[in-house]
Every structure is written in C-alpha cells, then in structure tokens.
Image: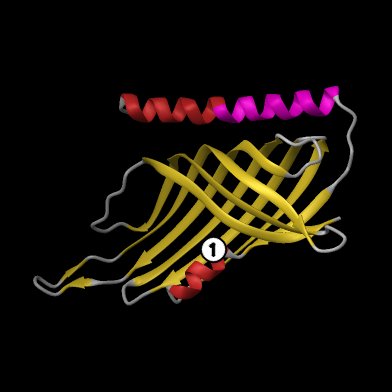
Amino acid sequence: MSNFQLCISKTTKIGFVLLLLCVTKICSSQEIRKENNFKADVFLPSYYFIINSSAFSFSYEHQIKNNHGLQMSLQYSTDKNLYGSYKTFQLVPIYKFYFNKLYKGYYTGTYLKYINYHVKINKTNNSNSIDDSYEFIQHKGAFGILNGYLFYIGKKKRILVDPIIGIGFSQVLKTEFVKKGNYSFNKNRLDAIVALNIGYRF
C-alpha cells in the first residue's frame, strides 16, 4: 500500500470516529427536540433520464437539537449500454450543522458513504477476437465535507428545497470478481455529492 493509499485509509477511519463522537456528544448533552423531513433528489433522476438510464435517491433528516441534524440517504442507479450494465447502491449518513438555530438556511457538515458497485461488461476485441468481458462487485467507502442551503416554501412552510454539494475521497474496500478480464481501476479517487432535494417537513 502506497503512502497516499495509507493516508486516505486513515483519513476515512478518523472521519468516521469523529462523526460518531460528535453525534454522541450532541445527543448526550442537549435536550432532544423532534423535527423531521422526508425528501427526494430530483437532480440525480433527471440526469440519468437524460442519458437514458434510471436512478432514485431518498433521504430522511432528523433534527437533534436547534442547529444540529442527521440525515440518511439511500441512492440507487442503473445504466445499460451496448457493452453491458452498471448498478450502483449507496448508503450515505450525513451530519449537518446549521448556522441558523431555526434549522434552516446555510449549513455545513460531513458525510460518510458506502457504495456497492456491480459492473458486467460483455465485449470482444474484433481485431484479435480476444474476449474482453468481465464482471465484478465492488465495495467502497467514502468520507467528505459538504455545504447546502435549506429553505421552505408555501403558506405553511412545510415544503422544503435543499440543494447540497460536497467533495471527499473514496477508497475501494473489496472487489469480488465474478469474471476477471482485462480491467484495472484506481483504489483511491475523489468522491462527490450533488443533489437538489425537494421534500416535506413534519
């Protein structure tokens, strides 16, 4: 393992521990006030629709206290082309800190991400008739920081809009080859979150 890979691995583990410690401290030191919202990302499905694929992303957010919140996001996407298919499942826990204690407006935070990536490629190199097919299931972890801005619309201020963007690093945790072909990948790379969530507060 290179120094860069070791650094990313340690950073991911440290980020996970810090996130857990932060949430534990907030929950134990403050009185809990319940406020929740459920939302769906409209950016991801729109993008995949344009490229003739499909995807969905749903999130549930819970206010811990005043300007602290936790969000859990579930994402799934699938794509097919002439060569094969790609399926991605993501589970993304997020911690948010709102600068406004009314639990709206600008916020910053951190996220963790588990990614399950299933790739199946069927193709043949026509020049030499070599089978270049391969299939694998890959497990990845990611850690990063994010920013967003949540605001409410409507007379009763129940409908919410929550654009969010974040950047971080991802690392391959495990790769299971169903069929190993002529394929290579980087174990560490940049990670990102981009979403335009629309939902309901209750």
Question: Horizontal and vertical percent for residue 26?
Answer: 78, 27
Residue 134 at x, y percent in the picture: 31, 62
Q: Is residue 169 above or below residue 175?
A: above
Q: Is residue 8 left or right of residue 141?
A: left
Residue visible at 52% across and 37% down in the picture? 144
2 horizontally vs 126: left or right: right
Is 108 left, or right, of 87 in this rendering?
right
Magenta stretch secondary structure, dominant: helix
Across and down, in percent, residue 128 comes to 9, 70
> Where's residue 66, x and y in %?
82, 35
Q: Is residue 164 above or below residue 48?
A: above
Residue at the image point whose x is 46% and y is 74% from the top: 50
Quadrant of the rendered image containing residue 81 = bottom left
Residue 116 or residue 152, whichever sits in front: 152
Q: Is residue 27 magenta?
A: yes
Observer-nearest residue: 136 or 151? 151
Give the residue displayed 77% in from the left and 35% down from the top. Answer: 67
Which residue type does callout 1 highlight? Leu
Q: Given the current orientation, which residue lies at the most extreme front position?
A: 155
Task: Please tell me whether residue 94 is drawn above or below residue 116 in the rendered image.
Answer: above
Can residue 195 be found in the magenta stretch?
A: no
Q: Which residue is mark 1?
A: 44
Residue drawn at the location 83% of the way across and 57% of the way down: 157
Q: Which residues are magenta?
A: 15-29
Judge whether 14 appears above or below 198 on screen. Answer: above
Occupied quadrant, residue 6 = top left
